[in-house]
Amino acid sequence: MARQLRIAMVASECVPFAKTGGLADVVGALPDALSALGHEVRVVVPKYGSIDPAKHHLQPHLRQMCVWMGNAEEWCSVDRARTSGGVPVYFIESDKYFARKGLYHDDAFNDYGDNPRRFAFLTRAALQLCRDTQFSPDIVHCHDWQSALAPAYLKVWHWNDAILGKAASVLTIHNIGYQGVYPAHHYDYIGLQWSNFTPRKFEDHGNINFLKGGIAYADLVTTVSPTYADETRTPELGYGLAPYLNDRGDDYIGILNGVDTAAWDPETDMLIPARFSRHDLRGKAICKDALQQRFGLENRAEIPVVGVVSRFADQKGLDVLANAIERIVQDMQVQFVILGSGDKGLETFYGQLPARYPRIIGSHIGYSDELAHWIEAGSDFFVMPSRYEPCGLNQIYSLRYGALPIVRNTGGLADTVEQYDERVGGGTGFKFQALDANAVYYAVGWAVSTWYDRKHHISKMRRRGMGQDFSWEESARAYLNAYDRAIANKHRL
């Protein structure tokens, strides 16, 4: 696009302020990439209780802001900070809704009962902030169910608004398994007129479905990889929304995520024990040695290390790996390092493995950004047995850090990992199709046999993977094309 766009981005999380998954990485990096291309971007997120204002240099922006919901008048304040690239981030402060430890659920992983009100309020507040600050966006870009009401609010409440009336909307689906389905008694508070509570819009078997309504109202719908766009059009992976996505036709597209190359670059990463590049891998050997020591593994460079950094959630297939990992370490000379949390049964299982397989398996239950970087830098392989994976970022980080991915052939994993060609040493990783323990076992076995029997192929694949460009600039340009289409669709109505 030749002209500068004004973009308001609304989301429930954003690196480095609040994160539970890849959504935060995207919302933290895409605005900077768009800004670098000459566009004006503002990001709006909640001010969660877990956000440290001093650490992130939050400053007061608006002392009071009135937000009209369907049947209530709410008040909040707004703070402001900036991303590393200088993009302003606005924090909606409401003790009533956001002053909690968890983003979406309590320590027992029970969803907060008022989640539909919390995120309806966030979305309305983001639009009100545009009005109160006289920021007239060309695009309102919302992410997942938490801000999926924005397209409907624009068309129902703001269609003739001087500030928001010309804004086109783009909805990005990061994970269609989470749709924001809640009881209908919240609908009056949401305030989108009962005439819109229909099976083609917000009604879902008597409940409200935020994401479904967003799909109906958005000027363009995107998701985070081309393969995932195809998969979500099917009954198997559409989770009930495939018919509505198919109805959108060419107005539903997949745009592959980029990665934050400033944060994830082995040549400059100060979190890891040594720096390295595709042209000089000596630092990777140092990182592997340090990783083995930190996790209590046998310090032997000749044994391959397989890394895991993941949420222990059904989507990630860590239960499938659990059914294969003991057989793998019993039959193969290989080590594992595991970082993750979530499902309590899997936390117990993976947490106990180091005691059962000392100096062979190491694990850390929880999350540590530093450990995640250490595992990517020190591992030789990285396994992701996902049931589905909209885009995935860890396999891209792995490629950049020379840890060859072992992945199920689904979603963004299929789009980013090139299958190993045993004849010539081509490809960048190892892909398997079936979702079962045998498939994981044999895929890891294929990688391990390549390590021992065709080491020159490992080096060749490593350098190829590390040389690929997964920066945000290309993805940002694809989003700009999507914004152009959304604006055209808006004006066509």
Image (tube, rainbow, N blue to C red):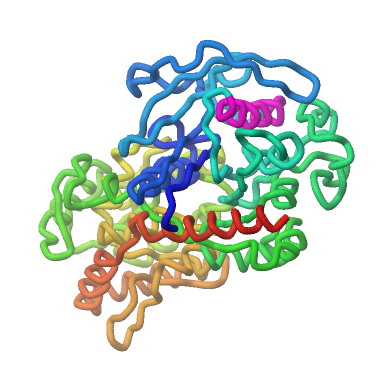
For the record, the magenta segment spans 113-131
Residue 452: percent from left, percent from top: 24, 73
Q: Which residue shows up at 46% across the image and 42% down it?
A: 27
Q: Quadrant of the C terminus?
A: bottom right
Dominant SS in magenta: helix
Q: Could you tell me how many numbered marks the image carries?
A: 0
Q: Nearer the viewer, residue 353 or 170?
A: 170
Q: Quadrant of residue 458?
A: bottom left
Q: Residue at x 36, y 77 (%)?
A: 420
Q: Is residue 95 above or below residue 478?
A: above
The foreground one among 362 and 112 is 112
Foreground pick, 341 / 32: 32
Name the quadrant of the N terminus: bottom left
Asked if 158 appears above or below 335 in the picture, the reply is above
Residue, x 61% and y 43% (percent of image)? 167
Q: Is 190 on the left-hand or right-hand side of 365?
A: right
